[in-house]
Image (tube, rainbow, N blue to C red):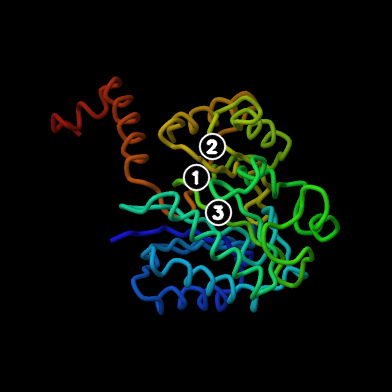
Amino acid sequence: MKLVEMVPNFSDGRNRSIIALLENAVRETRDAKLLDTEMDYDHNRSVITVVVTLENAAELAYRLIEIAAENIDMGVHAGIHPRFGATDVMPFIPLEDTTMDECVKVSHEVGKRVGEKLGVPVFMYANSALTPERRSLENIRNKSFQIEQLRETIGSGRYIPDYGPSSVGRAGATIMGARDILIAWNIYLNTDNIHVGRRIASAIRGRDGGFAYVKSLALFIQEKNVVQISMNLVNYRKNPLYRIFEAVRAEAARYGVSIAGSEFIGMVPVDALVESFNYYMMSDLKNNNVLNFHQGKI
């Protein structure tokens, strides 16, 4: 069976009834399974993880975008995470025997239909990008260029949508494409100093000379009164979790700051966790901690 993972990001993390509508759409789709839902109040953003057959992926993706467009008004949206639209990002990830080319084909089918039927501008990214600069999501939407800027510039220069109108309505715009598995990961620092957080985020960010496959932002989480390093790991095999964690710990120590905790958003490949478990287990072995446990002394 050919399977596709979909990890749509929706610009609402506060209204449970809206997210329930999206979850129900997954449950009502043949051969689809809801794996995880993450709602974040401060980001005002929800991430749903779904596995569905390739045959039904396009219809489910369209239905989710339609529900979000009907229920999320970007004209009144507020949150600390960068955002373009009600369905902010719609990625398609090949699983099992599904190929990347098949996911690219589905993404363009959905993008064209969303643009024509729903009137939502669609920007294709990652492996579905039609121009090289749009392969990277941050070249389309980033901390300094969000829906407010898009409203003023859409249809000119770099911001001509691949599908749909050159105008932004209630539902904003959607970024869509086929990509590999990534890990969304937040590390919390025991400080409210956003300037320290930005230096740490820059130190580990690939484009600033850090880890090649890490994209990072520093965000102030008002509810917790702490700084969050928000990351996307686009290749966890080449940039393992434990290396990034230790780098953040070392950078934070330079400013007299420590790590307060961390969280994953959505699903994480088991081999990414096992690799990090092995690293820390071996570190403990060298200190005799785990060795004593295995000898039955702890």
Q: Which of marks 3 and 2 is in front?
A: 3
**What's the residue at 69%, 68% (across, down)?**
120
Q: Which circle marks residue 259 in the picture?
A: 2
Residue at image coords 71%, 73%: 73
Q: Which of marks 1 and 3 is nearer the N terminus?
A: 3
Q: How far apart are marks 3 and 2 (CA)?
A: 34 Å
- The three-letter amino acid code for the residue at tag 3 is Gly
Labels 3 & 2 near each other (Cβ < 8 A): no
Query: Where does residue 114 sit, x and y in percent of width and height?
Result: 61, 69
* Left or right: 170 as drawn, with respect to 206: right
With respect to residue 117, does 161 lie above or below?
above
Residue farthest to the top?
286
- If you read the primary sequence from the N terminus, does the residue marked by circle 3 or circle 2 appear first? 3
Task: Give the residue at mark 1.
Answer: 262
- Mark 1 or mark 2, which is nearer to you? 1
Residue 84 appears at what percent x and percent y?
70, 59
Which class describes the residues within 10 Å of circle 1: few (<14), some (14-19), or many (20+)? some
- Label 3 sits on a secondary structure element that is strand
Q: Are marks 1 and 2 in contact (CB under 8 Å)?
A: yes
* Above or below: residue 21 compared with residue 259: below
Tell me the distance, in whole angstroms, between the alpha carbons under discs 1 and 3: 28 Å
Residue lying farthest right? Answer: 152
Q: Which mark is residue 234?
A: none
Q: In which quarter of the image is residue 204?
A: top right
Label 2: few (<14), some (14–19) or many (≥20) C-alpha neighbours in 10 Å: some
Vertical arrangement, residue 22 with respect to residue 260, above or below: below
Q: Residue at x 48, y 56 (%)?
A: 92
User: Foreground residue, 209 or 297?
Assistant: 209
In the rendered image, which quarter contains the N terminus? bottom left
Residues under labels 1 and 2: Cα distance?
A: 8 Å
Place of residue 210 in the rendered image (x, y in percent of width and height, measured from the top left): 59, 26
Labelled disc at residue 177? 3
